[in-house]
Image: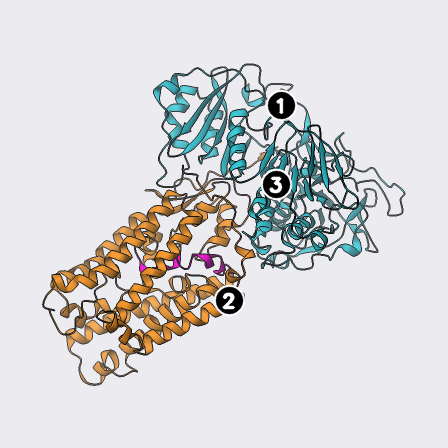
Chain colours: A cyan, B orange
Amino acid sequence: MRIVIIGNGVAGIEAALVVRQREPSWEITIVSEESDHFFSRTALMWVVSGQLSQRCIEPHERDLYARMELTRVRARAVGLDTEGRRVLLAGDLDPVPYDRLLIACGSRPRPGPWPGADLPGVGHFVTMQDLEWLETELHGGPSHGGRPPRPDAHLAHTTEGSPYRPRPSLFGARGRPRAPAVIGGGLIGIEAAEVMVAAGLRPRFFIREEWFWPIAIDEAESTWVADRMREHGVDVRLEENVEALEGDDHVERVITDRGEYECDHCVVAIGVIPNTDWLGASDGEGRPRGEAPALDDGGGIVVDAGLATSADDVFAAGDCASVPWFDGSRRPEQLWYTARAQGRVAGRRLLGDRVAYDRGVWFNSAKLMDVEYTTAGWVNLNLEDERNWFFEERGAVRSTTRIVLSGERVVGFNLLGRRWDHAVLMRWIEEHRSLGWVLDHLAEASFDTELVPPLVIPEEARRRPPAGPAPSKIDPPKAAPRFMG
Amino acid sequence: MDLQGQNGLETTFREGWRSRNWLAWIVAVVLIAFYVDLYFTDHLQPVAEALGLRSKWFVYAALYTLAMAGGAVYYLRKHGNSRYNRWRIATNLAVQSVLAFTLPFVAPLFFSPSPSDDWKYEYFAASIWPLDWYSMHPSVLGSIPLILALFTIVSAFVIAPMAAYFFGKRWYCSWVCGCGALANTAGDPWRHLTATSTRSWKFEKAAIYPIMFLAIGSTFLLILDAVADLGGFWHQVISGGDWWSMKSLYGLVVASILAGVVGVGLYPLFGARVWCRNFCPMAALLGLQQKLGRFRIAVKPDMCISCGNCTTYCEMGIDVRSYAQANESFTRASCVGCGMCAHVCPRGVLRLENVKNVQRDKARVRLPVVDL
């Protein structure tokens, strides 16, 4: 059996390891343009600042591919021949035949829609090559940890418009940036701002929305994070729409609906889109052969609950897969955790098992500047009968606790500043617990480090009735979450 | 205000002196030269006399305490936002300045006149056998005040194993021990240089357990020699004054070369726990007791992003990430419980804890699969 996996990221590697664990003799080939070695994409920011080296963010020893007998092809896939069951590659490489195929090629940065978004000095922070660009922009080059081996091995086998092409830096002409900017109020944006702070710079952070990261946190929570950013020297500019980037031969100004700002370095972090523009049906000479997997409106590969695409024996997992959601809609889940989980399910599918992907109760975590964030369940969804109980702690420890109710039942948690065991919170959601019960037992879910004083909620705050829905920027779900039944 | 976890980003790999550049090599050479001079010459003796100190070891203790205090300032500026780190480093400093420096200094006031000519008041209460290998020698036990001899025995055979059972070996290696305290203060800038490869782990196992058996076995022989009065040839081999006797060789190889010259001299090149990880017999013994005890590092299931901060900043070279991404709470014999893995984890996945039933929730992994 010949297994081919497109993508050397977390979904692809998890799938490969699941297959290898059970089938020692199957041929497994991993096609990746970006990198020889699987690395943690969520850890790129620490490599820029110098907290980690390139080698540190690789979760396995580098002999993994030899030990697990995984063949690697370092090239861009340019098309799929589903009739002849071959993956077509850029350059002069022979197509790779498959019996079962997994597409786990991830996301690419969403390009800025404004004039000047492609000026030199403007870039993104998603790929390994973005990392190289940003390190050179801010520091003049890599840290003492060095570059990964063969950083440019794919350049003979790539195409125009690939997100993995190296981007030239302005550092040689400009030196360190004086007026850096970040556009886009999400997680990649705050990470870019943070690595600029670590490099000794004071970035401007343009956020279109009323507050930072409204998809996940509410105004009170977000205001605290924005305060932390400002304390670290970030100029947080809320409700400011970028209209253009200007400059002669490189970026010099950011024009917004509120003014004009000097800018000699800019990271555009307005989200990611499925990395599927290569996925046309082709026989390598531009003529379609066989039906390519169907895509949704956003470019995500449409998959069923078993991660199967519309093409025979072709599966998709991770950021590029558009999976069905509880409310009947479909969209990609662009998270490390879901990519890893989908990769494991995809591995079972490649083995021929009849299994379905079931994410269960939602959970996520992040670190916003230096404020830790944990969420579980259904938060910021504007449910019809939603109420929010909120408590802000300001003492030896600062934290916020938001518990979301649907009717009398606790359905979600948004927690900042303290550490929590999300597995316990998820169990409470599944057990239909009430607010009073949860508040009585909250200490059991604490995951604070030792010697941290416990969270104490005064009686007066406990009795406070939950308010209405938290203002949210996303549309309410079309149907009630499945677990509510 | 306390923030959990790391506050601000480190720039470790962008600092040459922390990345084995020429400056790091110079610091290593200077440290090695200092330790060779300290152990094998008497150049510091006149310095001690000029300062009114009883021996060169008090000069060394003073320098040691100063280095630790300077390192503590460096460490707390970076990581002092965490209570665990604050309390731990404060305890280190208190133990060093009171038990290791002041007490031996003022001991003549309490035990005067000296109970025997052999005893020079150099009793370090925080150094426990088998780290302080000499302390269990019959000749030493016989020459110090009875109360201290009893404390030596009780601390080695009752207090240390019991505390390791309840709190893990961290109670000693990270809170009390002078070697660990120096490593976590003056040595902290280089903690990420500890090797994490499988090879380094194999070397660790092949080095530390033989030394542990050597320390225990040689102490047994010394006691046997004293109790059974072997005399003659065997007495010469075990505890004679010649350089080739077991007693002299252990002192030379383990106590001087491995603990001092290699242990501290290699800080800037291989991290601050070279001695603790690979050679310390006390760490080996406490590690085995820790495996049987209540200490563990708990892992929150499915929350790891495999970033590698924990593995990189583990000073003992433990691949913490491999456990975190496998959802496996764990107890490793080598873990000294410094708490840095939990501190640098950006998702709060790790927690040091003492629990009664260490295996209680190993099987709570959630699989995102429905079998059809």
Query: Disc 3 to disc 1, how far (Cα)?
Result: 26 Å
Query: Disc 2 to disc 1, how far (Cα)?
Result: 53 Å
| Quadrant assignment, res B63 | bottom left
Disc 1 chain ID? A
Look at the image and tell me whether residue B65 can be seen. Answer: yes
Q: Mark 3 points at which residue?
A: A203
Label 2 vs label 1, nearer the camera: 2
Give the residue type that dot 3 points to: Pro
Count neighbours of disc 2 (C-alpha within 10 A) and say few if under 14, some if 14 to 19, many if 20 or more.
some
Mark 3: secondary structure: loop
Query: Disc 3 to disc 2, how far (Cα)?
Result: 32 Å
Give the residue type that dot 1 points to: Lys
Q: Mark 1 points at which residue?
A: A473
Mark 1: secondary structure: loop
Whole-percent x, y for residue B317 in the image: 46, 58
Mark 2: secondary structure: helix
Disc 2 chain ID? B
The C terminus of chain A: image quadrant:
top right
Q: Residue B23 carries which label?
A: 2
- Magenta segment: does it hold B189? yes
Label 3 vs label 1, nearer the camera: 3
Up-down: is A42 above or below A206?
below
- Bounds of the magenta span? B177-197
Look at the image and tell me whether residue A59 can be seen. Answer: no
- Please tell me which residue lies in front, B366 or B82: B82
- Please tell me which residue lies in front, A72 or A247: A247
Labels 3 and 1: the sequence-earlier one:
3
Determine whether, in the image, residue B144 is placed left or right of residue A416.
left
